[in-house]
Image: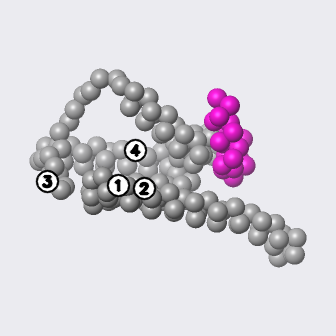
Amino acid sequence: MTKSSRSSNDKLRKPQKTFIVLGLMIAFILTYFAHDYKGVQFVLILWTGILIGFTLFHARFGFAAVYRQIVESGNTEMLRAHMTMLGTASTLFAIILIFDMGFFGSQPLPSVSEISIGLFVGSFLFGFGLEMGSGLAPASLHKAEGDVWRCFLLYLAL
């Protein structure tokens, strides 16, 4: 490894550490408020979501990547994995709803509700999170190795 490539790698790693520390600080602050609000139940849900998101981000397993891989190489492996996950989740949710299996003394019930402001806020946050994780990023941003700031600026421009 040459000296110039080593120094450029060091420059690339420093912002990554900043984002990791900032993300962990936010996660622990959210953990405190989740525990204060509802106890251990919300903390477990929060950290389950954080760990699943971390895993999917580092596996580069996103919605757009599946179809990009099909078009670029004809490989349907990721599509089969998505369909397997969808089938597994549907089966597990059906079992949970049929047998009323809930944690922390809760009883899960299927529900239908009206369209509310929460739907719009939740869909915005979902789209924002996918854009930041390059799950819905255009191909040019994907080729730029998931440059988060470009994604952020593109999202703000929309």
| Circle 3 or circle 2, nearest the eye | 2
> Which quarter of the figure is the C terminus placed in?
top right
The disc at residue 83 is: 4
Q: CA distance from mark 3 to mark 4?
A: 32 Å
Q: CA distance from mark 3 to mark 2?
A: 23 Å
The residue beneath circle 1 is 34
Q: CA distance from mark 3 to mark 1?
A: 18 Å
| Circle 3 or circle 4, nearest the eye | 3
Q: CA distance from mark 2 to mark 1?
A: 6 Å
Would you say residue 48 is visible in this rendering? no
The answer to whether 37 appears left or right of 55 in the picture is: left
Q: Residue furthest top?
A: 114
The residue beneath circle 3 is 105
Amino acid type shown at disc 4: Met
The answer to whether 100 appears left or right of 85 in the picture is: left
Main SS type for the magenta part?
Answer: helix
Circles 2, 1 touching at the beta carbon (< 8 Å): yes
Residue 60: percent from left, percent from top: 56, 54
Of 3 and 129, nearer the camera is 129
Q: CA distance from mark 4 to mark 1?
A: 32 Å
Amino acid type shown at disc 1: Ala
The residue beneath circle 2 is 30
Tell me if residue 139 is in the magenta stretch. yes
Amino acid type shown at disc 3: Gly
Q: How would you rate the neighbour count of disc 1 (Cα within 10 Å): few for under 14, some for 14-19, many for 20 or more?
A: some
Amino acid type shown at disc 2: Leu
| Circle 4 or circle 1, nearest the eye | 1
Q: CA distance from mark 4 to mark 2?
A: 32 Å
